[in-house]
Image: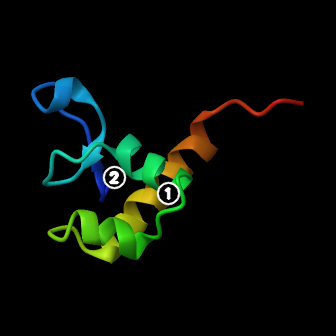
Amino acid sequence: MKKYISSNPEILGGKPVIVGTRIPVDQILFLLKEGFTVEAIHEQYPHVSTATISGTVNEAAQFINNNVPKVS
């Protein structure tokens, strides 16, 4: 069961978002790639706790780990 990420066709066309927001998960991952810390992302989205941001990243990583085929 997903705790931090949801997808609904009526919210951003079904794009995965942080639960209870319209913040796309890919935006959070992009900010991390650009060097933002969880705390800096929280400053951009102060209504989302650092624990929720971290949980979202962990949940996304777990999804990728469990669903992307391994190359032998």
Q: Is residue 5 left or right of residue 10?
A: right
Q: Three-letter amino acid code at disc 1? A: Leu
Q: Position of residue 69 (x, y in %)?
A: 70, 30
Q: Is residue 3 left or right of residue 45?
A: right
Residue bearing the label numbered 1: 32
Q: Nearer the viewer, residue 31 or 11?
A: 31
Mark 2 surroundings: few (<14), some (14-19) or many (≥20) residues within 10 A: few
Q: Three-letter amino acid code at disc 2? A: Lys
The residue positioned 19% from the left and 23% from the top of the image is: 13
Q: Is residue 65 left or right of residue 70?
A: left
Q: Position of residue 31 (x, y in %)?
A: 44, 53
Q: Quadrant of residue 45?
A: bottom left
The residue positioned 21% from the left and 67% from the top of the image is: 48
Q: Position of residue 5 (x, y in %)?
A: 31, 50
Of label 1 and label 2, which has the lower sequence position? 2
Q: Secondary structure at mark 1?
A: helix
Q: Quadrant of residue 4?
A: bottom left
**Nearest to viewer (mark 1 / mark 2):** 1
Q: Nearer the viewer, residue 65 or 57?
A: 57
Q: Nearer the viewer, residue 52 or 66?
A: 52
Mark linked to residue 2: 2
Mark linked to residue 70: none
